[in-house]
Image (tube, rainbow, N blue to C red):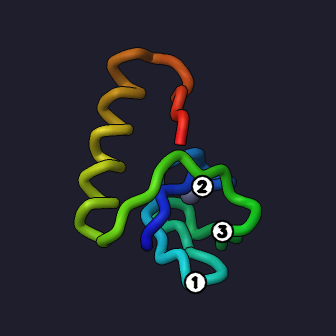
């Protein structure tokens, strides 16, 4: 299981393995703790999670507002 979380440093979306405790943001270098991070989605595989993150980024850009994610 993979999670899509919001970086606490720069606000970008990161894909992280749920088994990990934390994930270092490739953009700003902040270590994001998964237990505290804001989760916006999840997927079974890294590939699915990556694709979902891309869609969420596009949607956020198109709507120009915060993500209303219900899961
Ligand atoms: Zn970041």
Q: Is mark 3 within 8 Å of ligand 1?
A: no
Residue visible at 40% across and 15% down in the picture:
63
Mark 2–mark 3 Cα distance, whole angstroms, equals 10 Å
Mark 3–mark 1 Cα distance, whole angstroms, equals 8 Å
Q: Which residue is mark 3?
A: 34
In the rendering, which numbered label is found on residue 20? 1
Q: Quadrant of ligand 1?
A: bottom right
Check disc 2: other Cα within 10 Å, few if <14, some if 14-19, many if 20+.
many
Residue visible at 70% across and 70% down in the picture:
33
27 shown above or below 56? below
Q: Earlier in the sequence, mark 2 or mark 3?
A: 2
- Left or right of residue 43, residue 6 in this image: right
Disc 2 secondary structure class: loop
Check disc 1: other Cα within 10 Å, few if <14, some if 14-19, many if 20+.
few
- The answer to whether marks 3 and 1 mark residues whose Cβ atoms lie closer than 8 Å is yes
Closest to the observer, 44 or 46 = 44
Check disc 3: other Cα within 10 Å, few if <14, some if 14-19, many if 20+.
many
Mark 1–mark 2 Cα distance, whole angstroms, equals 15 Å
- Left or right of residue 27, residue 28 in this image: right
Disc 3 secondary structure class: loop
């Amino acid at each position: 299981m993979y999670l899509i979380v919001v970086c606490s440093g720069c606000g970008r979306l990161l894909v992280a393995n749920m088994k990990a405790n934390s994930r270092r943001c490739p953009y700003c270098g902040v270590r994001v703790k998964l237990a505290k991070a804001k989760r916006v989605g999840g997927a079974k595989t890294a590939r699915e999670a990556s694709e979902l993150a891309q869609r969420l980024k596009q949607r956020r850009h198109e709507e120009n507002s915060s993500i209303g994610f219900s899961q």
